[in-house]
Image: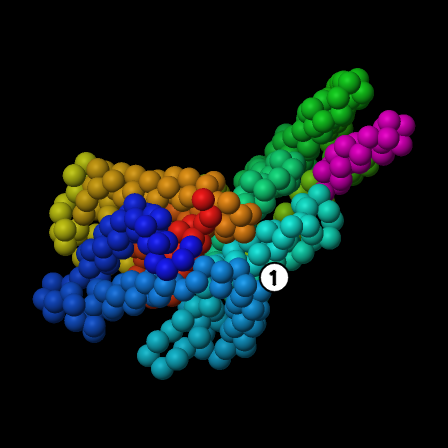
Amino acid sequence: MKGNKWWKTLDWWTIGIYLVLIMLGWLSVCGASYDYGEPNFFDISTRAGKQIMWIGCSLGLGFVLLMLDSRLYDTYAYPIYGIMMFLLLATIFNPHEIKGSRSWIVLGPVSIQPAEFAKFATALALGKFMGEYTYSMQRMRDMLITLGIILLPMALIVMQRETGSALVYLSFFLVLYREGMTGTVLFSGICAVVFFIVGIRFGEDMLPDELTSWGEFCVSLLIVLLTALLVQLYCRESGKRPALYIFSIGGGTVLLSVLFSCYVIPFNVTFLLISIYAALIAYLIILFLRERLKNYLFISAFVFGSAVFFFSTDYVFNHVLEPHQKIRIEVLLGMKDDPAGAGYNVNQSKIAIGSGGLFGKGFLNGTQTKLKYVPEQDTDFIFCTVGEEQGFFGSAGVLLLFMALILRLLALAERQTTRFGRVYGYCVVSIFFFHLFINIGMVLGLTPVIGIPLPFFSYGGSSLWGFTILLFVFLRIDAAREW
């Protein structure tokens, strides 16, 4: 568009929601960080004063991003991504360590977290690559490069000991699903989560034979039943009889072997289960060679991957995860009760939210937050301040605002005329949704505590700037779309 006509197509509704959210976020930071007798909230020596300074900078940053030509984001997507990957790599060797993490670059009094800005750079790179005319998700080379763009920043951030921020990049897989990735990949991811939770949660609960755990039995039976279901769904007419065989023979063998071990002669069922998996894979490969249907081959890969993943979960849980990550998962799954340790933050957060009732205690009147019972109450756990001071209705109002923002961004993403704009828009939606879901979930004790901020609410300049860049770059791309 020529001149300043793009201002007329700028989505002011989204900007309005953004402004409301950052002001509510600032009020929450005021409530979470306020001490009785503290000077005014605009004093930059206080957390509230610093946050209002970050907000002012964010507004200026958003204005600059809107003034830039939208074509710059497409043209310089790869250089921006390269620069951010270099910063992530350099941060690994950063001598400054904050709370066990090397994810911060310290510049005098200012600390910047490159991982927050790498999200928008990754979204730009994905949009640029997937927006190419010759791109096809069915082509192996294109798919591998797409995965590389996502997994590279994840790996670098994990090396910074910032696992929570790295997990955010899993949200990009929702974008791939929107752009045509087969649903089996998403299905496999959900299965991996289920296998991990069931295997770990019931891994120490033994069957009567005292040799086989309930987790091992349940996951093994699940793998067989899901294999039969996949054969039934994806192998058309030729899969009906094999699905029945897998369900009856495979599932029956698992069940009978466990019953035999429990009530006749106890033995280690693990080796028999491995044999069942091997027989399943061999049977599926034979069906592939006979029917020439690739789906049989893919399902055999699912069985192999599921078995390897399940038998490796115990090792990963006990030898790869950090002790604090392990205890958090154990507390979340109800395996341990540690109200004074790993479960302290969540328990105090629940108390703060519950004490707010329907209408809350009022601004600056939250006793739990004033007495600093909730650690990180102005960053990762800031939603407990909303719950205590504004109650159920105030918390519901904040969630409705976030829902309005996400739905609006979805509508903007769908109306893009280029794949670059659509992919980037869905990246923005996915990141916001992931942050909202995980942050609210961990405050309520529904998801593990992985330490990611609530967009526009949590204290900190890097987080606020990162979300502002994500949003306003997309608004500029949307404003310049061709009608």
Relative placement, left or right, of 31 versus 483 is: left
Relative placement, left or right, of 242 versus 204 is: right
Q: Quadrant of residue 65?
A: bottom left
SS class, disc 1: helix
Q: Main secondary structure of the magenta part?
A: helix
Q: Does 230 appear in magenta?
A: no
Q: Residue furthest bottom?
A: 108
Instruction: Give the residue displayed 43% in from the left and 62% down from the top.
Output: 69
Q: Which quarter of the rendered picture does the N terminus lie within?
A: bottom left
Callout 1 crowding tier (Cα within 10 Å): few <14, some 14–19, many ≥20:
some
Residue 460 in sight here:
no
The stretch in magenta equals 282-305
Q: Residue furthest right?
A: 290
| Percent position of residue 206, x then y | 61, 35
Instruction: Give the residue displayed 48% in from the left and 71% down from the top.
Output: 102
Q: Does 287 appear in magenta?
A: yes
Instruction: Give the residue displayed 86% in from the left and 27% down from the top.
Output: 291
Residue 278 in sight here:
yes
Q: Name the one closer to the observer, 359 or 293.
A: 293
Q: Amino acid at mark 1?
A: Leu
**Residue that label 1 marks:** 152
Q: Name the one closer to the observer, 79 or 395.
A: 79
| Percent position of residue 48, x then y | 21, 64
Instruction: Give the residue displayed 73% in from the left and 47% down from the top.
Output: 139
Q: Which quarter of the rendered picture does the C terminus lie within?
A: top left
Relative placement, left or right, of 128 versus 427 is: right
Against 103, residue 321 (above or below) is: above
Against 240, residue 458 (above or below) is: below
| Percent position of residue 156, x then y | 57, 65
Q: Name the one closer to the observer, 261 or 28.
A: 28
Against 445, residue 148 (above or below) is: below
